[in-house]
Image: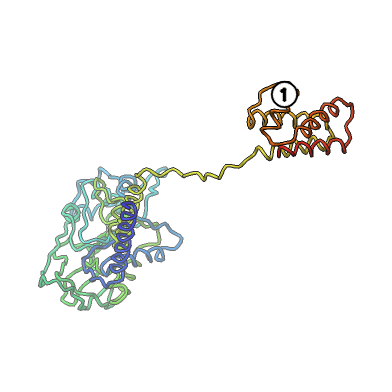
Amino acid sequence: MWRKILVGAVILFFVALAYSVMSFATQERPISWTYSFSEYGVSPFSTRVFFKQLPDFFPEKTVAKLGSDEIPLQFWTNPDINDLNGDSLLNVEPQKRYEDVDYSGRFNYISVSSKFESNYFGTNGLITHIYEGGHVQIYAFNYNSLLLDRLGIKVGMIPDSPDSTPNLATQEVFYKGKSYDLRKTRSEEYFYDYPQKVDTLLLNDSGRVMGIKAKIGRGSISLFTTPHIFTNYDLLYVDHELAESLVSDLPIEDTYWSKNLNNFKKEDKGLLCFIFSYSTLKWAYFVLLFSLLFYFLLNMQRKQRAIPVLEAPKNLTLSFLQTISDLHYSQLDYHSILKKKMRFLRNQIKSNYHLHQKEIDEVYIEQLSKRSKIKKETLTRLFDFYDQTIQQKSITKAEFESLCNLFQLFKI
């Protein structure tokens, strides 16, 4: 009874859960307009489209994300330039390399995020990489003060109305003498102070600088306050040509990208973080956990042992006697058959008529005749004929059948 109730409750629960999941999956969800810059996200302000198309800009070259544990391997510091800032850093001349020294770490580095962060090691390693011939492009609304102080650059901001509705209006910007459409943001970040050797690349219609480029040693670094041009929405619905023009300014080299250069901060948050970032995967994970839980709960109870099927008892004695009789009859061993029949007859007489006398004489036959209602002459003929027949060396079939008919007087 309770088992049926429990099974019904479990089935009802899973039906309700399946209905809830289907309802949640089919209902229209509100669009998230938060700047996540996630390379996996499909929301308007994620960057999945850009990083999926990034390898096309560098054919036959390696394009990969730079993990936090790989930063010390790719960016190493140079003590000669670690203490140089501003004009002194931009004016430093690259040292002449010896013939046996080859800098094999020349590659492009791209960062797209809301705020670019870098610790002391990451900043010095990035400057050394540029000094040795690497090219860097960083797109962010805000920058870590370590990098800005090293370059002698200051960033300003003009705030806008802090409403919750995203600003989808566009403005005109200029890059290398060509105009492009750029979507406005709630606040406008721009570069208002920088060394004289820094080149201005991107200007808006108000004349504010939104992109600069500085050469350090053999390489260059470009900073932009427009990371939103790489979001899914801007690439698909605003103007993808600006993003393509900026990335195309990099040489065709191996390219690595990340959101920051803080090697002490773990960016890889694991599989669960990736699952919880998508509502469908999160619900599938919960359904799996609930299914496993109920499976173990239902299997905790003791299972009933299988009840064996009991068949009706069979009388095997008759089958055995029939088999033995057929065996003797097939071998024509009449002596043995008659002896067994006589032994069986004597046992039946003891059991039915209570005559326990071993010898067959006149008294035995007379008592047997009275109790069995069989004539005395017939009984005498039976026992005499048996004695005569059993003493013969060979018994014919006619004699055997005649004696068997006499035995049938007792219905055995």
Q: Is residue 179 above or below residue 254?
A: below
Point out residue 249 in the picture as x, y percentages from the top left corner: 34, 66
Q: Give the residue displayed 35% in from the left and 63% down from the top.
A: 51
Counting other residues with Cα less than 10 Å from the Cα at mark 1, is it few (<14), some (14-19), or many (20 or more)? few
Q: Give the residue displayed 71% in from the left and 25% down from the top.
A: 364
Relative to 48, is 343 on the left or the right? right
Q: Is residue 97 above or below residue 56?
A: above
Per the image, label 1 sits on a secondary structure element best described as helix
Point out residue 122 in the picture as x, y percentages from the top left corner: 25, 48
- Reading the image, the residue beneath label 1 is 363
Point out residue 378 in the picture as x, y percentages from the top left corner: 78, 34
Relative to 53, is 233 on the left or the right? left
Q: Is residue 85 above or below residue 323?
A: below
Report the amino acid beneath label 1: Val
Q: Quadrant of residue 5?
A: bottom left
Q: Is residue 356 above or below residue 14?
A: above
Relative to 362, is 152 on the left or the right? left
Point out residue 217 in the picture as x, y percentages from the top left corner: 29, 54
Relative to 199, is 11 on the left or the right? right
Q: Nearer the viewer, residue 363 or 278?
A: 363
- Placement of the C terminus among the 4 image quadrants: top right
Q: Nearer the viewer, residue 334 or 262?
A: 334
Q: Quadrant of residue 256?
A: bottom left
Model colouring:
rainbow
Residue 387 showing in the rendered view: yes
Q: Nearer the viewer, residue 56 or 51?
A: 51
Q: Quadrant of residue 210?
A: bottom left
Q: Nearer the viewer, residue 203 or 375?
A: 375
